[in-house]
Amino acid sequence: MKALKINNLKKCYKNGTDALKGVDLEVDEGDFFALLGPNGAGKSTTIGIISGLVNKTSGKIQIFDQDIDLDPATAKSYIGLVPQEFNFNQFEPVQEILINQAGYYGIDRATASQRAETYLRQLELWDKRHVMARQLSGGMKRRLMIARALIHQPRLLILDEPTAGVDIEIRRSMWDFLRTINQQGTTIILTTHYLEKPRACARTLPLLITASPLNTPACANYSPSSIWKPLCSISITIIITYPSPFPAVNYASLMTRPWKLTSKTQTVLIRYSKHYLITIFRF
Amino acid sequence: MTFTEKFNAFKTILIKEYLRFIRIWIQTILPPAITTALYFVIFGNLIGSQISDIDGYRYMDYIVPGLILMAVITNAYANVVSSFYSAKFQKSIEELLVSPTPNYLILAGFVSGGVARGIIVGIVVTLVAMYFSSFEIHSFTLSLSVFVLTAILFSLAGFINAVYANSFDDITIIPTFVLTPLTYLGGIFYSIDMLPEFWQKLSLINPILYMINSFRYGLLGVSDTDIVTALFIIILFIAGLFSYALFLLNKGIGIKQ
Ligand SMILES: Nc1ncnc2c1ncn2[C@@H]1O[C@H](COP(=O)(O)OP(=O)(O)OP(=O)(O)O)[C@@H](O)[C@H]1O
Ligand SMILES: [Mg+2]
């Protein structure tokens, strides 16, 4: 089953900004999927639409086969969201934020308290449970949002820039944590600017590189040099497969270079699952 | 969501709203108690003793229903407008928007929070009033109904105000320039019989007049307006405002891009 299916998703904001010009995306159940892209690529817009915070202009979205327009409540109950910006009440105590969030998913208070304790301990926030949210440090706030997103035990966890403002130590344990819940069956989608993050999770660097025009069945071209040629074309898909027959490829520079080459970059998607990592560049 | 899940969601919003205004009771519960006590001392005691009875009641007693209802109106409105606006401002409204809680329950939850504050403040003000005045309640059922319906109506109005508000100034404009004048002109301190005919007629388009008078009828048994008409108007307003607020929420006006 697909955890997420997006068909031809378009978003034009009221001020005329064309944030999404027809995104197609599929994420398998159990995947650890990274959406990569420069600032303004449309990552947060996509996530906002999936989770019901942004109205789409057109397109179709399904979460575990539930259409978000036909059965929004069921679709929403599958998703846990960690947004890019802090969005909790700064004047509420940490524990209450979690218990309330559970309540919004229909969970009774006793169960909610138990789960709040579990996740606060796992994310090393238990000592801060009575503290007002605004008194937490930036990294703690981020972890609070992760705990909050997990409180109803979603099948799909979406994290928008989860490691922003988190120190290296915690970042590492956060990746371990995400990897663990992924292994326990939660599908994960995250966005990031840095390759370092999915890479840390992806165990090894991606190895096989393919390029093809977008919307065509994945590529036939297996040479790393082929990546550069299609950059001038309208859109390309780059699929990077694990394990790599090209250990020499400097993946990081590959990722950053084309963004500098063209300002028309729209969305870059990286997908990591057990066997492969897919990157989609759009131009 | 099952019925129990929906009930849990509603209860969560209500408890959260309740804790919010209780936590800051010095700003939410105390001021109306002080203001009412001052009204009683100044208008009731000092000035009121110079004024003759209205509809057979001492001036002090005559102004009690209006003062209680004014506190209910102001507080129900203020609670929802500031709570929902700050949820928008801090983006914590997104916690609800990503959840499966249906919009009508979100609305009902915020409105119930406003009603809870309206009722608590109303009770506090009533206690203060009982210290200064003495009367027997004419109809407890009618008083309670008008009291609760008014709290619902103005909670809904506060909600709509918050949906449209883009700044903290926007949440004080309506209370200052619309609500307060209409409340004062709604016959808290006088019977419209005391006004020239033109102003009497004009007063009749003020919906707050009907609420104050039906509440006064509930407490004292005297009114300038017909009670059935008054209740009809209040319920009509509630239905209209509820539908409109729900429409705004469904559309995502002011909360979704
Ligand atoms: N509320 C809004 N109103 C108008 N335009 C917006 C709004 N939010 C985002 N945009 C525009 O939509 C485009 C995509 O923005 P989005 O936030 O989705 O990018 P992003 O990929 O998440 O970027 P970042 O990496 O900086 O978080 C940008 O051009 C942005 O200016
Ligand atoms: Mg973003």
Image (cartoon, coloured by chain):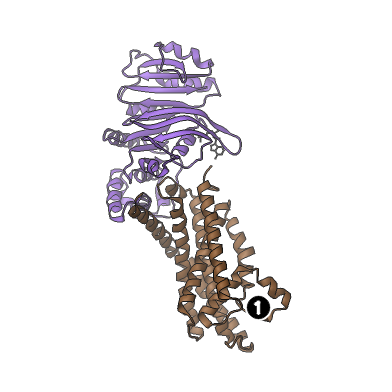
Taking the image as shown, residue B253 lies to the left or right of residue A150, namely right
Residue A165: image location, x then y, percent: 42, 39
B224 is higher (above) or lower (below) than A189: below
- Residue sitting nearer the eye, B92 or A123: B92
Residue position marked by numbered label 1 in the rendering: B192
- Residue sitting nearer the eye, A150 or A92: A150
The residue at 63%/64% (across/down) is B178
**Chain letter, brown:** B
Colour in which the image shows chain A:
purple
The residue at 61%/35% (across/down) is A16
- Res. A109 image quadrant: bottom left
Q: Secondary structure at mark 1?
A: helix
The residue at 70%/79% (across/down) is B195
Chain for numbered disc 1: B
Q: Amino acid at mark 1?
A: Ile
Quadrant, the N terminus of chain A = top left
Is there any visible trace of residue A37 in the rendered image? no
The residue at 59%/70% (across/down) is B208
Taking the image as shown, residue B10 lies to the left or right of residue B241, namely left
- Residue sitting nearer the eye, A58 or A80: A58
Residue B58: image location, x then y, percent: 57, 87
